[in-house]
Image (spheres, grey):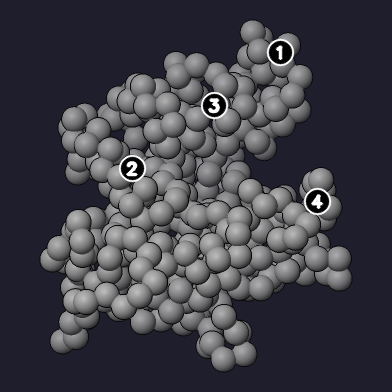
Amino acid sequence: RSFSICPSNRELQETWWTDNHFFIGTCAYPERLNWVSAWGKRYPNDMTLEQARQLEAELAGRCGLQVVRLTSPADAAVELYADQGLRPFVKVTQAATLGKPLLPHYEHVKEARWRYPMPEAVCRPHSADLGRRLGRQAVFFEIGNEADNKDFWMGTPEEFVRYVTFAYEELSREAAGVPVCAAGWTFIEPDRTTSLMTAFKDLLPWSSIHAHGTFMQSAEKLATFETLLSALGTADKPKVQTEMGYCHWRLDMDAIAAAHTFRKIIYHWAKGYKGVITYRLRDQGGTRLAGDTNGMWGMLDHDFCPRFTYGVLAAMIECLAGYNTIECLAAGPERYVYVLNRATVRLVITFVPEIAWAPQPL
């Protein structure tokens, strides 16, 4: 975990694009660093706001991550991470239009208004602006966030479909050729998930999913996702994991999260996903003993100390750079075995599905 002995992986970022054809990224929230929560400032007291933003980006680049998820970002946020070799995946939400009106039948809502749909006249220009400004840099766009989870969308499924449809029209016009997906499906409300995926099956070129938790929890959700894609006749549509994480709510979870992250990345890669976005870069909700315990998902803690997940990702990016094919030899239930190829080199990776604290026979 020590920066003093681990070299930077910046020079390997391009190798992953040109040779591996699979990306590893993270979610960052530079726009939230000026917020204040119940746990105080979102960065250490001995740092300035700009120092915190810069250090987050530097450590993402040093790890070798290739993609950063930014939410309806300003140009400065995109440039901040581009300077560290990361390309933006742009999440298009209504958050940038806070303070604007809601649809008339939601105007009575006083709190968490961002969960409710806004008028087309407000949101359509915002989507067009993002496409126009960021189309050349963006790896892809994702419209909305977890619309099958009422924590993030309190409108109807039909209202979300209308929102995505006109947002996609603007993005595809202003950023032609840049892939677009919607929502990051969670299956928290399976009927809603099915309804929305059905509505978008012919509209959007990519499909995305959010699958948190252990390796097996993630694998089970991917199976549900892929079964539905097959039923809709879209199994060949490009897939991407746009949010996967593990909460470090207890100290020993640091090691457990790292072990599951390794498994999940290999699993997605072998199943043909375009890439994975880990959740998230750093804890902004305070320290472990005096912060938001339920919000501790970062590979960096509040004070920028790297957790084991950061070290695992850096090691994977270093050791697996240049491997351009991956083949699954066994996918459970007791062993998962994969072969990676790079020129004349073959690398075999094997793991058991759950964390094993004792040596395992091969």
Q: Amino acid at mark 3?
A: Lys
State which tag comes first along the sequence, 3 or 1. 1
Q: Which mark is residue 150?
A: 3
Which residue is label 2 attached to? 221
- Which mark is first along the chain, 2 or 1? 1
Amino acid type assigned to the residue bearing label 1 in the image? Glu
Residue, disc 1 = 107
- Spatial CA distance of label 2 from label 4 is 33 Å
Of callouts 3 and 4, the N-terminal one: 4
Q: What amino acid is labelled 2 in the image? A: Lys
Q: CA distance from mark 3 to mark 4?
A: 25 Å
Give the CA separation, mark 3 to mark 1. 18 Å
Q: Nearer the viewer, residue 255 or 59?
A: 255
Q: State the residue in front, 347 or 203.
A: 347
Pick whichever of labels 2 and 3 is earlier in the sequence.
3
Q: Quadrant of residue 319?
A: bottom left
- Looking at the rendered image, the quarter that the N terminus falls into is bottom right
SS class, disc 4: loop
Residue found at the far top of this picture: 105
Residue bearing mark 4: 39
Indicate the quadrant where residue 214 lies. Answer: bottom left
- Residue at position x 22%, y 80% in the image: 347
Quadrant for the C terminus in the image = bottom left
